[in-house]
Image (cartoon, coloured by chain):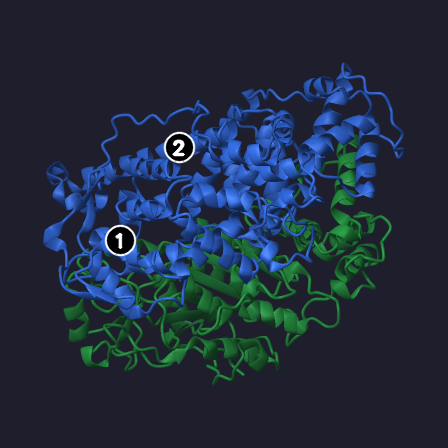
Amino acid sequence: MGEDMQPNQYLQTAWYDPSFKWDWRTASHLMNRAGFSGTAQEIDQLVALGPLDAIQHLIYYQSIPDSSPYMQFGAISDIDIGDFRQIRFFRDLTPDERREFLLLKLAAGAGKMDDMRCWWLNRMVQTKRPLEEKMTLFWHGLFVSAFMDVQNAYHMYLQNELFRRFAVGNVQDLTLQVSKDPAMLRYLNNNQNVRGHPNENYARELMELFTMGIGNYTEDDVRESARAWTGWTFVGDNFVFNDFQHDYGEKTFLGQTGNFNGQDIVEIIFQQPATPRHFALKLLQFFGSDEPAPPELVLALGQTFQDENWEMAPVLQKLFSSTWFYSEPVMRSKVKTPAELVVGSLRKLNGSSPNPQALLFSMQMMGQELFEAPNVGGWPVGKNWINTSTLFARYDMPAFLVTGRRPIIPGSAWNDNSPALQEFNTQYSPELQLAQAGASTTNSAVDWYIRQLIQDSVDPAKRSALISYLNNSDSTEDMPLNLTDQSLHARLLGLVQLIMAMPEYQLC
Amino acid sequence: MDSMHTRRIFLARGLTILSAASTLPAFIQKTAEALNNPADSPLTQTAAGRGDDRILVIVQLAGGNDGLSTVIPVDNDDYRNARPTLAVTQNLLSLGGNSNLALHPNLQGFKSLYDAGQMSIVLGAGYPNPNRSHFRSTEIWQTADPVNIDSTGWMGRYFDAQCSGQDPIKSETAISIGSLSPMTLKGDIFQPTSLQNPQNFQWLLGQGNSRQATSLRKAYQLLNGINPKCAICTNTGLNFLQRTALDAELSGRDIRAATEDHQNAVSYPNSQFANSLSMVARMIIANMPTRVYYVSISGFDTHAAQQRTHDNLMTELSDGLTAFINDLKASGNIDRTLVVTFSEFGRRVAENASAGTDHGTAAPMFVFGGSITPGLLGAQPSVAPSDLSMGDLKFTTDFRCVYTGILQDWLGTKQTTEILDGQFKPVSIVKA
């Protein structure tokens, strides 16, 4: 199943081809992409289901209970500081009091965002409905809003929940709801888009980055669309259509004329041929390959969106069932995003992190701070995640998972002696996992970890390097492992971190 | 122990690469050789060019700096009428002559450097058919291509052009501070080094001299230095990762030595921007082979309540950069260093309804160094309503003319036309 695939085969059902194998390799590939990678038990379960049932199990998850924690919001009164002039009590404050209030609010917002990141990370790790969180992440990276500009944690939460609700739902409906979302209205300044003083930001990005792509509309279309969106704003936590601020005049948009408002704009956008192609491209990149997808495939998947009336679930089913999805260039060749790397690592080590904050900081060093996409274009793609700085962040992260702290470098001024990390006690036990797996020799331990972590075979020379490390000698002899031996513990932790510091581990 | 000596020792003891299969990509094979025979290897060469030790520092003002609040038209009614609340009129730092221009009051450091002939200003820098998307306009400045979407930056292409045969230029020849690597420095072949935090710029577990650390380090180097068998040879993702790991290994020691073992000669203000600059200064003082550094300061996208934010940014910008220039002066590095600032666009002439400004067009670029042409370069765009284009300034200097000056006169390349895909009349920002 390789590069000699014909275009008309791309979306054909993979298992109709007799050479297709549904096994550990293909099932873990599905789990990597449709979720955040699987534990050994989860992958075995998918293999047993067979490909069709496995895919449906992942996509039609509504019957699986959502047991992940909910986000608590206390009595933070999130006053919109952009409209502080409207808040009477704020006006009564002296300039010093105002500054202090704003600083408190900033700190409260930032603190809440840390809580939200921990909350979402835990959801991604613990969920029994991994595609739900994966699709939330997808929408989060497409319909971008960043806390830095929104400055309202509750609104960021509402937006996140919107994405979760529409995770595998109707794309056109979601687009309309996003246009009414307070975080988005603020992020792209549509709350400042009023009759007579139009602000084009939302109108532009909606087409350029969210739905159609550059080159499929004109500057006139942007201007007319902006007029249609006037008055779409929010008060408090709710969307409000301010009809006094709305430009009711006639507009000409993408070749159609009428007294359009935002809802009409969305409808017209979803009638354009560029739109299904755009969403297909985004989906193929996020779930398939960092390399540009073949044009025929983009067209075919775009057609599927239209055939399915913009319902995401059947489109995903088509994609996850396709010959292309299981082809060699697509398997094991995608750079893991920081979220996939961190969450996947936690899942594979059967862990929950007692210190999610350290992992979130690590993700930030890798270039992905949740809720803070660097710009409205969203997250980097593929190799752009990788540079010398982010690579070390990825390679150093596993230390937190297995030891609970950064490694101590003897004599270095840079050892982190902060009490919080010192008290920290990780629950990761390599001995427990190996005992459960029945791995009682060095070779079998290395093979088990390679299977568990890389989920594919590795170059024999690299396997040998890992075995001789574990043997603590130049020999790759298969030596017995005494799992009660204390001195072996550090070596096993070292083994796990070594595997996770391989280039292969950065790919899924 | 100077850094050149340290590097040779590191390379001699350093990475051992297992059997080089015939399918190794050439660069990995050459790197393996370089690591074992540093004196012989062309890979330990730096980018050739005029003045092998000349440095360029690019400073990005991210978000769209309001040029009209930075380099300010003095006694100008059109300016004041367009900005009833935002016009900067008090405590201006006059740039003298017949310019009728002044610097923002918080740019005192800049003014001193300007008076000393160590700062110049390129006025009205922009490009035709201005784009007002942060995303796209930043890309245009970084790729030097206002028309097509490129995947390489102008400095990346400069390094690619320096590359002879199959030997790539070392990654640490261009260093950016921050976790995301700017397009400016990326070539088809050349990849820069990105650095956030020197002490994290290493595989921490393998550091130290204990037996455990040593055996870990040995295994790590094997796992990151070998190219797997041919089946995955075509996997460009894996090749790229391995190459990055090797690059990081080669440059990590140098960078840590430079930033930890060297001191700044002046004290820096307390900001992330100033901290990044102080790191760059230490690397310059340590005589790293790096030719280009890239630093970013963000926060300039002032759509609402602009005044306080912009005032603070002016302070941060001026205090940070002035400390940096003074540091280079004190350490004797100012003559070989050129610093250039840019922003993806300026902002509109008229203020908006939220006491802020929206995305605009042309804006000034600041140039610093010991070998620069001082003063004001180019012409300040007129703010008279009849001279505007849909409410925006018309650019007077194409930024590619500035790039041409840098490439040709500072870096001494003859391949400017290929690198910029066109010929542009250079702005003489450096003395001949």
Q: Nearer the viewer, residue A271 or B283?
A: A271
> What is the three-letter code of the residue carrying label 2?
Met
Label 1: chain letter = A
Residue B159 placed where, x, y %? 63, 69
The x, y position of residue A422, in whole percent, is 56, 23
Disc 2, SS? helix
Rendered residue at 63%/25% (across/down): A41
Side of B394 relative to B422 (left or right): left
Mark 2 or mark 1: name the one nearer the start of the chain.
Answer: 2
| Residue B354 point in image, percent of width and height | 19, 55
The residue sitting at 75% across, 62% down in the picture is B44
User: In the displayed structure, would residue B220 be above or below residue B40?
Assistant: above
The residue tagged with tag 1: helix, strand or loop?
loop
In this picture, is B370 found above or below A428?
below
Mark 2 sits on what residue? A116
Q: Quadrant of the C terminus of chain B?
A: bottom right
Which chain does tag 2 point to?
A: A
Q: Residue at x 76, y 35 (%)?
A: B216
Q: Which mark is residue B353?
A: none
Chain drawn green, letter? B
User: Marks 2 and 1, Cα distance to the nearest angstrom?
Assistant: 24 Å
Give the camera-side residue of A335 and A297. A297
Please give the letter of the chain rendered in blue.
Answer: A
Check contact, mark 2 vs mark 1: CB within 8 A: no
